Image (tube, rainbow, N blue to C red):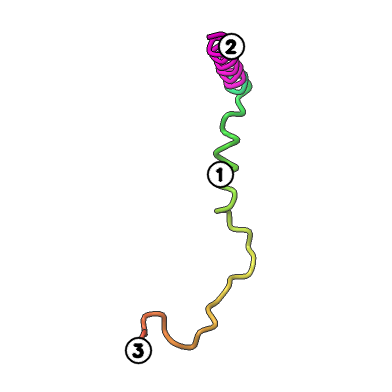
Amino acid sequence: MNALVLTLFVSLLLAMLGLLEFAMHLRRGDHRHGDRLALLPLDDDGGATVQASSTAPLGDHRP
């Protein structure tokens, strides 16, 4: 029974800490940083494009 009470106490403490951290990020206004990081791989960096080396058309699957 003591382990259950301790587990619940630690879980509530961690949940409150997470909510406090979330509120601090909202107040600072940096909550949109995750959106920019998620879209970063889609950004065109102007690099070279890779072309297929096959001579057959893509839709041609004849043996």
Magenta span = 1-23
Q: Provide the residue designation for mark 2.
A: 6
Q: Is residue 43 magenta?
A: no
Q: Is residue 31 above or below residue 27?
A: below
Q: Provide the residue designation for mark 1.
A: 38
Considering the numbered disc 1 on the image, is that residue within a helix, a strand or a loop? helix
Say how many tags the image has. 3
Q: Nearer the viewer, residue 61 or 34?
A: 61
Q: Provide the residue designation for mark 3.
A: 62
Q: Which one is earlier in the sequence, the residue at label 2 or at label 3? A: 2
| Residue 42 percent across, percent down from the top left | 55, 53
Residue appearing at x 59%, y 48% in the figure: 40
Q: Which of marks 3 and 1 is in front?
A: 3
Instruction: Assign the C terminus to one quadrant of the image.
Output: bottom left
Kindly check if marks 3 and 1 are in contact, taking CB atoms under 8 A apart as contact: no
| Residue 46 percent across, percent down from the top left | 63, 63
Q: Is residue 22 left or right of residue 60?
A: right
What's the CA distance linking mark 1 and mark 2? 37 Å
Q: Which one is earlier in the sequence, the residue at label 3 or at label 1? A: 1
Question: Callout 1, which amino acid?
Answer: Ala
Q: In this view, does 50 lie above or below 44?
A: below
Q: Nearer the viewer, mark 2 or mark 3?
A: 2
Q: In this view, does 10 lie above or below 36?
A: above
What's the CA distance linking mark 2 and mark 3? 67 Å
Considering the numbered disc 2 on the image, is that residue within a helix, a strand or a loop? helix
Residue appearing at x 56%, y 15% in the figure: 7
Question: Callout 2, which amino acid?
Answer: Leu
| Residue 30 percent across, percent down from the top left | 62, 28
For disc 1, the neighbor class at 10 Å (few under 14, some 14 to 19, many from 20) is few
Q: Is residue 48 left or right of residue 39?
A: right
| Residue 9 percent across, percent down from the top left | 57, 11
Q: What is the number of the mark on residue 3?
A: none
